[in-house]
Amino acid sequence: MAGRIKAEDVALVKERSSIEDVVREHVTLRPAGPGSMKGLCPFHDEKTPSFNIRPTVGAWHCFGCGEGGDVISFVQKVEHLTFSESVERLAQKLGMELHYEEGGRPRDGESLGRRSRLLEAHRAAQEFYHHALLNSPEARIGRDFLRERGFDSEAAKRFGVGFAPRGGEELSRHLRSKGFTDDELTIGGLSGRGSRGLYDRFRGRLVWPIRDITGDTVGFGARRLFDDDRIAAKYLNTSETPIYKKSTVLYGLDLAKKSIAGDRKAVVVEGYTDVMACHLAGIEGAVATCGTAFGVDHIKVLRRIMRDEADLAPARVVFTFDGDAAGQKAAMKAFGEDQRWASQSFVAVADGGMDPCELRIAKGDDAVRHLVDDAVPMFEFAVRTTIARFDLSTAEGRVQGMRAAAPIVNSIRDSSMRPEYIRTVAGWIGVEVEQVQAEVSRAQRLAARDAKADGDAGPGAGTGGGAGQAPGHPQRGQRADADMVPEPSFEEARAALPAPDLRDPVVFAERQLLQTLLQYPDSFEPADIDSLDAEAFTAPAHRAVFDGIRAAGGPRRGLSTQAWADTVAEAAPLSVRGLVSELAVAPLPTRFDKATGLPERRYVDALLVRVQEVSLTRKIGDAMSAMRRMAADPHTDPAQARALSGELQDLQRELARLRDRAS
C-alpha cells in the first residue's frame, strides 16, 4: 500500500505550485480582467474560451462544463493521475521531498508513482539510445542516415535522436541495472516478454523520442535502417501505454508550443525528419503525428495552444502533404475535419511532391520557408484537387466537376462566404455562376436528407471504420506498433556484434582466456577475475561474454562444467549465447597438468597477463596523451598535472610487475 502524504506537505505543494505555470503547459492563457486569465478548456471542446484561472487564489473553473478546483485537481484531471500521484508529480517539479504518515511509505518504494516511474524509464532509455547513436560503431548507419539528410550531431542532440542496438537485450539489461522492474519495462512498451526473458522492442533502428507537451518522453518512433530487419514496416511506434496515447500526442509539440502560442500558427507535417527540417529552417511551429492519422483529439490539443477562438482573428494551420494520390486523399480528409476549426486551414505541396526534409536538402532553408508561406487555402486545394479528375474541356466533364465540387462548397461553415466561393468555383470550371449555385443547392438538400437518415438510424449509424481520421497518411503500409515486434532470434542477435578477428594475436589470446574460464573455472582464483575488467577485451563479442561471466558471479566451486557454462549463457547477452556454447567446447591449444587435469598454471598466467597488458598499455597511452595536452596548455592546473603524472607512474609500475610475472 502507498503511504498517505502528510497534510502539511500537501498544503505546502499547493502553496508553492504556480497554477498559472502548470496550466500553461496545456492551455494558452490571456488576460480576462483583474487577477484572472482565460483560455480554451482542456476538458471539453469549445470555440469561445470559458476556462478561467485566478493565480492569486490558486483556483480554476470552466463555466462551460462546470469543472473546477485547485492545482492538484487540475493535474489529476489533465494527466489522469490519482490524488497522491498528482501531489508527487508537483513535488517532483518543485524539487521537494515529501513525508508520509507514520507507518506509511511511498508506493512500493516508488515515491513518484507508476506514471513517474514509467517516465523515468523512458528518460533513461532516451539517454541510452542517444549515447549509442553518438558512440556505437554499429550506429554508423544511423549517423550516415542523418548526415545525408542534413542533420549533424547538434541537430541529433536538439531532438534527442538515438539508435537502438541490434542485439535485442541491451536496453532491457541497461534499464534493469538502473533498478527498473520487468513489469515497468513491459508496461511502458520498452521491452517485450519472450521465452528467454525480456527483449528490446526496438532493435537496429534510428529512434526519435516522442515527448508530451511538458517535455517528458512518453514513447519512441523508430525507422528501419537494415535490409535484413525482420519487420518490413519503415516506422515502428510505441504501442498504447498508460503514459502514451498516440491520438493525443504530436511529435515536436514540446519544442513548438511556444511558437504556436505566440504566432497562433501551426504547421502539421508528416514525419519526424520533416519536423526537424522545418525547425532548423526557422519554422518552429512544426509538429507531426506519431503512427496515426491527424484526428479530432490532435485538433483539440492545437486549438487550446493557438487560442483557436471564434471571437479572435483567425489562427492559421498549414498542412504539408506529398503531391501523390495518397497525399491528396489525406488533404481531403483534412478538409472533412475543417469545420472543427475556427482557424483558417491551408495546404502546402512542394513542386515535385517533395516533403520538407527533401526540399531542405535540395533547395535549402529558404525553400522550406517559402513552401509554408505560399500555402493555399484548404478550400481551394480541396476543390482544385477534386475537379482535376475531370476533363473540363468537355460538357460532360464540366457537369461532373460541378457535381463533385458542390458538396465541398456546401460544407463551408461560414454561409455568408458561399456566394463568393460559388463565383470562384464557376470560374475555375468554366461555367455560369447559376449552374454552380443550382448544384450547391442540390448538394444541400442531399446533405439534409442524409443527416435525417443518420439521425433516424440511431447513434453510430454509418460511421464506418474511419471515424475521427483526418489528415496525414502514415498508414500506407509503412508504420506499425512496436508490440508486433517478435522476440529476437539467435541469428538476429548474433548479427549485432562483429565476429572476433582471430588473426589478431591479442583477440586470439582473449578467446583462449574465455575458453579456459568456461571449461576449467577451477583454474582461477577470485583475485584473477577481479584483476580484469570488460574493457580489457578488445573484441566486443569477447567483452560481452566476460560481462556474462561477471553477471553469473564468476567461477564457483562445486558447479559442474556444464552447469557453469549454462549459468554464463543465461547471464550473457543473447547476441553471444551461441559464442558461449562454442567457447565451452572448443579445444584449447595447450598442455594439461597430469595431476589435476587442468591447463598448466603458467599458461593461465600468460593469458591473464596478455589481456591485462593490452588494457594497461592502452591506459598508459591515454594518460601520456593527456600529459602532452596539459604541457601545451599554459592554463593547466599544476595540481591536476601532478595528479595525472602520479597516475601514469602507477600504471607504468603495474605494467612492469605484470611483465615480471610473465617472465
Image (cartoon, rainbow, N blue to C red):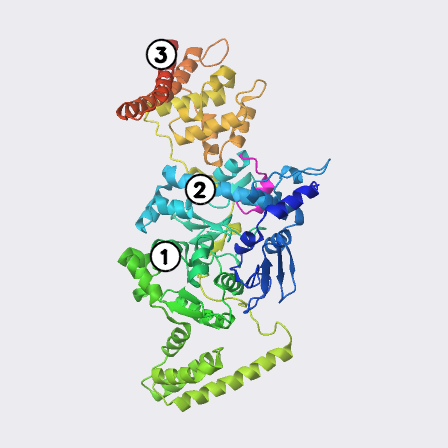
Q: Earlier in the sequence, mark 3 or mark 1?
A: 1
Q: Image height check: is 331 above or below 152?
A: below
Please give the residue where the numbered disc 2 appears in the rendered image: 129
Using the image, tell me which numbered label, if any, was put on residue 656: 3
Looking at the image, is mark 2 or mark 1 earlier in the sequence?
Answer: 2
Which residue position holds label 1? 278
Question: For this view, does 625 lie left or right of residue 156?
Answer: left
The mark found on residue 65 in the picture is: none
Task: Check the picture and name the quadrant holding the C terminus.
Answer: top left
Task: Residue 195: give x, y in percent of width and height.
Answer: 57, 41
Contact between labelled residues 1 and 2, with CB atoms less than 8 Å apart: no
Which circle, 3 or 1, is nearer the viewer?
1
In the rendered view, tell whether residue 24 sits above or below residue 13.
below
For label 1, the crowd category at 10 Å Cα-Cα, with few meaning under 14, some 14 to 19 and many 20 or more, is many
94 relative to 69 in the view: left or right: left
Q: Amino acid at mark 3?
A: Ala
Identify the residue at horizontal 44%, vertical 42% (top origin). Answer: 129
The reply to whether residue 325 is in sight is no
